[in-house]
């Protein structure tokens, strides 16, 4: 890990951009994990993977870092899940946090193009399903119900 090389800055920049792409959609929707949080999750995960791979050698397993991230990120995601009036809120935000960590890991393992593809698919799904929920009343039940639909 040498900060004076593109081998360092390409993954760092890519994780910031992927986090920003997803974070912008979350921020515009007023969700708990916006641009900053999304960038930090993606960047932090990328850096942990980069450190793990930089210090690999005989007798080491770089995927152990990945395993710790997968289990640890669940605690961060759990922090955005709330219950209100018997309904659970924030599960999508928690899932997006988990996905941001996966994208950061992909970037840390140098799967740059694939990570941008997943970031764009993620935003497309968030926007597309939100659009469908707004147009198809049978998709608006439980926590997805509009206030005007509950009368």
Image (tube, rainbow, N blue to C red):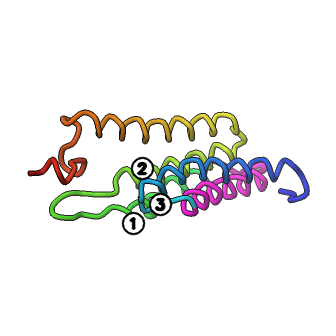
For mark 1, give the secondary structure.
loop
What residue did someone put label 2 on? Answer: 95
Task: Name the front one of labels 3 and 1.
Answer: 3
53 on left or right of 104: right
Task: Name the front one of labels 3 and 2.
Answer: 3
Of the pair 12 and 58, the residue shown nearer to us = 12
Q: Which residues are magenta?
A: 36-63
Quadrant in which the N terminus appears: bottom right
- Are the residues at dot 3 and dot 1 in contact (C-beta closer than 8 Å)? no
Whole-number angstrom distance, CA of label 3 to CA of label 1: 10 Å
For mark 3, give the secondary structure.
loop
Residue 79 image label: 1
- Are the residues at dot 3 and dot 2 in contact (C-beta closer than 8 Å)? no
**Marks 3 and 1, the one that precedes in the sequence:** 3
For residue 117, what is the image quadrant?
A: top right
What residue is rendered at 59% in x and 51% in y?
Answer: 66
Magenta stretch holds residue 50: yes
Instruction: Say few, some or many: other residues with alpha carbon within 10 Å of mark 1 (under 14 / 14 to 19 / 20 or more).
Output: few
What residue is rendered at 15% in x and 47% in y?
Answer: 149
How many numbered circles does the render carry? Answer: 3
Magenta stretch holds residue 56: yes
Q: Residue 125, relative to residue 76: is it above or below?
A: above
What residue did someone put label 3 on? Answer: 33
Magenta part, dominant SS: helix
Relative image position of residue 44 (x, y in whole percent): 63, 60
For mark 2, give the secondary structure.
helix
87 on left or right of 22: left
91 on left or right of 57: left
**Marks 2 and 1, the one that precedes in the sequence:** 1
**Marks 3 and 2, the one that precedes in the sequence:** 3
């Amino acid at each position: 890990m040498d900060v004076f090389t593109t081998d360092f800055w390409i993954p760092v920049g890519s994780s910031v951009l992927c986090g920003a792409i997803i974070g912008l959609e979350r921020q515009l929707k007023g969700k708990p994990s916006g641009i900053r949080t999304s960038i930090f999750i993606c960047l932090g995960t990328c850096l942990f993977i980069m450190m793990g791979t930089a210090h690999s050698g005989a007798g080491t397993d770089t995927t152990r870092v990945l395993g710790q991230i997968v289990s640890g990120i669940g605690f961060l995601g759990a922090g955005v899940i709330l219950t209100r009036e018997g309904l659970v809120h924030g599960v999508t935000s928690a899932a997006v946090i988990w996905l941001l960590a996966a994208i950061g890991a992909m970037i840390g393992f140098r799967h740059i193009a694939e990570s941008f593809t997943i970031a764009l698919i993620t935003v497309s799904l968030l926007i597309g399903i939100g659009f469908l929920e707004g147009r198809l009343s049978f998709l608006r039940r439980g926590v997805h119900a509009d206030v005007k639909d509950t009368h």
